[in-house]
Amino acid sequence: MKRIGILGGTFNPVHNGHLYIAAEAYRQLQLDEVWVMPDGIPPHKDLKGSVTRFERSAMCQAAVRSIPYMRVIDNEIKTDGKSYSYQTLTRLKKEHPDDKLYFIIGEDSLDKFSSWVHPEIIARAVTLVVAVRHDDDVTYDAASVIRVLKERFDAEIRLLSTDYMDISSSEIRELLTSDDAYHRNADRLKIVLPAAVLKYIRDHRLYGFMKGNVMSPKEDIAPSDFPKLKSDIEKKLVKKLKPSRYTHTIGVAYTAASLAMAHGFPMDVAFIAGLLHDCAKYMSPDELHDFCLKKNIQISPAEEKSPQLLHAKAGAYLAENEYGIKDPEILHAITVHTTGMPGMSLLDEILFTADYIEPNRDKAKRLTEIRQCAFKDFHLAILMILSDTIDYLKQTGKDIDETTYKTYEYYKENSNG
Ligand code: DGI
Ligand code: FE
Ligand code: FE
């Protein structure tokens, strides 16, 4: 028999207050495991911040990854529509008949417990754990509510004494309403959020992080005007690039958008990065070399040897100065799209992969396998691309940029999990 704590919630986003409660339950009730259970579409809540259920669940995953006794249960995420606690808890109890389940709720949810759907079924399936602030220990109200619940539902109730943590998800969403707010509140955010969750929010641009950041203000295009931005860039590119390169470019843009959909990134930002990634490709290697000298773009020894590599750096320069893109992540993704780099951002990874798998590509071996993998196990796909690229460069006797090797080593270490 295992003793299992279950901490349900919307987790929009999960924060250190939640983890603290979970850890206290683990310690005080001598639990074997704590399950963090994000709810699907909560019956009475309007989800703020337009974060999807998958993103809420992924943030929970990120939060518990380094805590051995915690894991995320996706039961409610995986049902469409309302899921009530009584349904989920009965199901969990059925699946784990020999274990003892502890359902952890806050002191404020206690009053409302009687008005939940089928509280009596919940009380039969689990022991209720009520987290109470230990400065006021059991307030008079809570004590009487507990007594009533014990009598009415024959509920087993345990108390969990906790310090008051002044953290709420709504406060955190406020701190993240815009990119400015994010930077202003960086110190507080580091305190209230686990580092891995903050990283997830940044990488995936959740809430207001990096919002409206694509265009330089000097261009007269509203950041939200994606269709116009897209067609303006396409019109310029079709004049600059030869037809096969333009076709490839469009393929990369749509593939990048698809990968963004699959892995949770703004698809319009990924699309623009895809459109512009090869925008310097109209130049020959010699022209690229001259261009970079003239624009003071640093040329590495590997790029001296294989100046066609410079189309990445030159492309980022043109994206910024000719196409008015100011988003630093887009410019970065273009800069590293050919060799990759260790620890790429999510957008870097999306562009790097889209360039390799877009539908017009047909030469590389294992393309079918890598294409499938890119939507299922993203980091493994990146590792396969790097490995095959290095093989190909070796076979054709080209100089390999050491960044390509380092990137390969990095993803070999980090590809699973
Ligand atoms: O610009 P694309 O052709 O769409 O694609 P890309 O930017 O990935 O460039 C692909 C070429 O770059 C391909 O022939 C492999 C080559 N490449 C990738 N890494 C290295 C490299 N070439 C050299 N010399 N060294 C590298 O490390
Ligand atoms: Fe390229
Ligand atoms: Fe390309």
Image: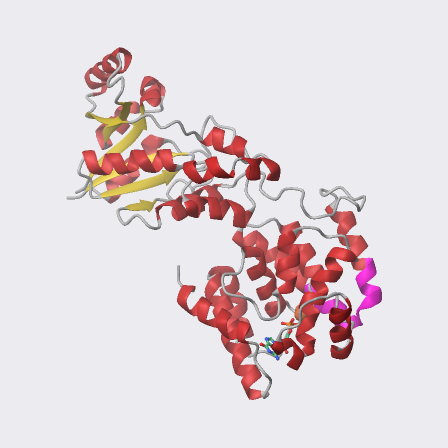
Q: Position of residue 166 (x, y in %)?
A: 39, 27
Drawn side of residue 134 relative to residue 251, left or right: left
Give percent across and percent down for residue 181. Answer: 58, 35
Query: Is residue 144 in sight in this rendering?
Result: yes
Quadrant location, the N terminus? top left
Q: Is residue 198 above or below residue 131?
A: below
Residue at 55% in and 61% down: 349
* Residue 142 as seen in the image, left or right of residue 396: left
Relative depth, front residue between 229 and 38: 229
Left or right, 26 with reference to 170? left
At x 54%, y 42%, the residue is 206
For the question of whether residue 14 can be seen, the reply is: no
Q: Is residue 110 magenta?
A: no
Magenta range: 235-251
Q: Position of residue 3 (x, y in %)?
A: 19, 40
The quadrant holding residue 258 is bottom right
Q: Nearer the viewer, residue 294 or 198?
A: 294
Q: Quadrant of residue 322?
A: bottom right
Question: Which residue, as the protein is rendered here, is positioned at the far left?
Answer: 1
